[in-house]
Image: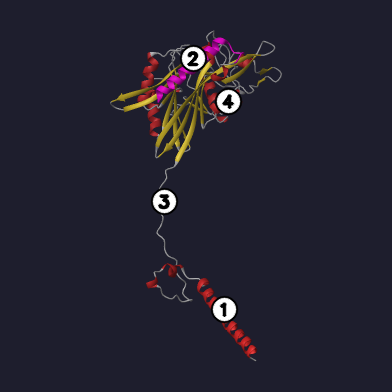
Amino acid sequence: MKKVLYVLGSFIIILLIGINAIFYYENMYIKNYIPVSEEVYNTPKSQKTAVSSKEKPQPQKKSPVQLQNRSEEYRATIALVGDVFFSGYLLKSYYDRQTQSYSFGNIMENVRDITYADLSVFKFDSSLSENTPVSTSGKYNAPGEVLNLLKSAGLNVAVLSSSHIFDAKKQGLEDTIRNLKDAGISPVGVKLSSAEHASNVFDINNIRIGIAAFTKELSGIYLEDGSSYKEYVSTLDRDTIKNELEYLKGKSCDIIIAYTNWGYENSTSTTSEQREFAKELVRYGADIVIGTHTHTIQPFEKIQIDDENYGKREGVVFYSLGNFLCDQTVIFPYNRFGLTVRLELTKKDNRLTKRILVEPIYIFRKTRTNGNYYDFILLKAKDILNRTDVKKSYIQYAGKLLENVKDQLQKLQ
């Protein structure tokens, strides 16, 4: 009997301990997992109050975050090259007698990394008129097929203020302007009435770029109606320079580029006249001056002007870029070379900075197997240094040219 009572008592004690443990566990579960509002959770213990289940707690308001204003940064690229004209074997070698048309192939494929830019400017030393025969000696008129070649290189701005723009008379000027515009190439340096300006403004990525172009007046040139070519072309004289550059400044241009047709042909030296006109151009607003017409490369430099009316200004002057594409068979190697200039522009907080890159190029004329015609290829001058199919005199000139360009660029810093 005592054993039975002992077992029964032990069972009752174990049962009571289990019930107590269940209630303790349930109590701990409730305390740990009932959700509480954020406000209550963050309230100090001395300030805690019960929250009615019917009242929705309001989220705590956070102070607004002040974001810093970040200025926009805008970029644009400009390619600037020298003289382009079509004559001699550059025409003969690409003419198909059967179709009576021209096909220029991939002449510029090796320099497209230079010429492809937001604005790609070239000096077109020719007319482009279907009403005049294709180029003859001393007068240049290009066939319409050159437009495809120019467009293939990304060239989209043509400087027309040159000594050959009236080789096809006034009608030739009108035809040239029309044909270029139809091809998506903007002309500068010429106009069709005295009421117009020969300069253009281009808005690229919120950067306003003004381009003017001037040619040194050649006396004695008159058109068939008795008018002077000065009525249609910007000439290199103080009044015209001031008028065109003041016009561009009035258009709020961030940078102004001025092309010039000046100097002596086949000369690698600058003249006092070029240097004086360079000062005038910078004085009236030009930031970059690009010289052409000599068909040879001339030096470049930074010049500074201190004028009592226009204040202190500085500009970079390339006295001549030389040729970019043509066929000149002069005994000197100079005519087969040219400079290309690339401007990398950055605008931030209405302040424009520019990086100037200069790449010399070489017009390679390779004899075809039949010996009567040539293949023309534009190459970077640095790429001919180890070629065996280029004349030694050209290679030597290329080496010196690359060294000179490097030295002159360092002086611009």
Q: Nearer the viewer, mark 4 or mark 3?
A: 3
Task: Name the residue tied to disc 1.
Answer: 22
Residue 367 lies, with reference to residue 124, above or below; the image says above
Q: Nearer the viewer, mark 1 or mark 3?
A: 1
Return the mark for residue 67: 3
- Circles 1 and 3: CB atoms closer than 8 Å: no
> The disc labelled 4 sits on which kind of residue?
Leu
Instruction: Give the x, y percent position of residue 32.
Output: 51, 71
Tell me which label, 4 or 1, sits earlier in the chain: 1
Task: Name the residue tied to disc 4.
Answer: 150
Q: Residue furthest right?
A: 98
Q: Is residue 152 visible?
A: yes
Residue at screen point 38% across, 19% down:
277
Q: Mark 3: which secondary structure? A: loop
Instruction: Give the x, y percent position of residue 232.
Output: 46, 23
Quick one: label 2, few (<14), some, or many (20+) residues within 10 Å? few
